[in-house]
């Protein structure tokens, strides 16, 4: 059996590195708690449900679609915190 290393993988393509903008964004988003994205996603779903119950179907559909991108951003945030960038 091979013993697996817990180290994060090195950049296999040394010619491809992240630019200063991507690095700055990752540094800033890493400061945010991951729970913010979870609660924001759940909040949009609750707001969409309330709008739908109030008879505002189109607004509810619009707001309800925000949940997936917010949760994906939360997953990205968590990944950057755990694995680091590059």
Image: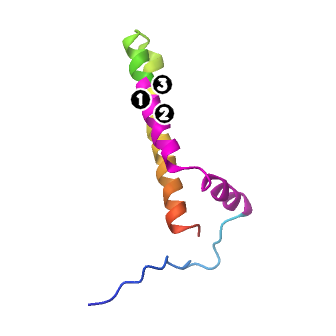
Q: Position of residue 41 (x, y in %)?
A: 46, 36
Q: Mark 3: which secondary structure?
A: helix
Rendering coords of residue 67 (x, y %): 45, 36
Q: Closer to the camera, 17 or 6?
A: 6
> Which residue range is magenta in the image?
20-46
Can you identify the residue that label 1 sits on? 45
Could you say where residue 75 lies in the image, as x and y percent from the top left?
46, 52
- Which residue extends farthest right? 20
Give the labeled residue for mark 2: 66
- From what the image shows, is residue 82 above or below residue 65? below
Identify residue for label 3: 62
Quarter assignment of residue 12 = bottom right
User: For this rendering, which residue is in front, 15 or 38?
Assistant: 38
Q: Residue at x 34, y 88 (%)?
A: 3
Q: Is residue 35 above or below residue 11?
A: above
Look at the magenta stretch and give its main secondary structure: helix
Work out which quarter of the rendered image holds the N terminus and state it.
bottom left
What's the CA distance linking mark 3 and mark 1? 10 Å
Locate residue 17 relative to residue 60 in the image: left or right.
Answer: right
Q: Position of residue 19 (x, y in %)?
A: 70, 64
Q: Does the magenta portion include 54?
A: no
Instruction: Report if the CB atoms under discs 1 and 2 are less than 8 Å apart.
Output: no
Q: Secondary structure at mark 1?
A: helix
User: How far apart are the two marked residues, 1 and 2, measured between alpha carbons?
Assistant: 8 Å
Q: Are marks 2 and 3 in contact (CB under 8 Å)?
A: yes
**Label annotation for residue 83:** none
Q: Residue at x 44, y 39 (%)?
A: 68
User: Is residue 25 magenta-colored?
Assistant: yes
Q: Secondary structure at mark 2?
A: loop
């Amino acid at each position: 059996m091979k013993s697996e290393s817990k180290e994060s993988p090195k950049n296999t393509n040394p010619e491809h590195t992240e630019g200063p903008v991507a690095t700055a964004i990752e540094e800033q988003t890493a400061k945010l708690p991951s729970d913010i994205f979870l609660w924001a996603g759940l909040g949009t779903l609750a707001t969409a449900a309330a709008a739908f119950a109030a008879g505002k179907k189109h607004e509810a559909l619009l707001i309800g679609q925000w949940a997936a991108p917010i949760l994906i951003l939360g997953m990205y945030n968590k990944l950057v915190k755990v694995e680091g960038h590059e």
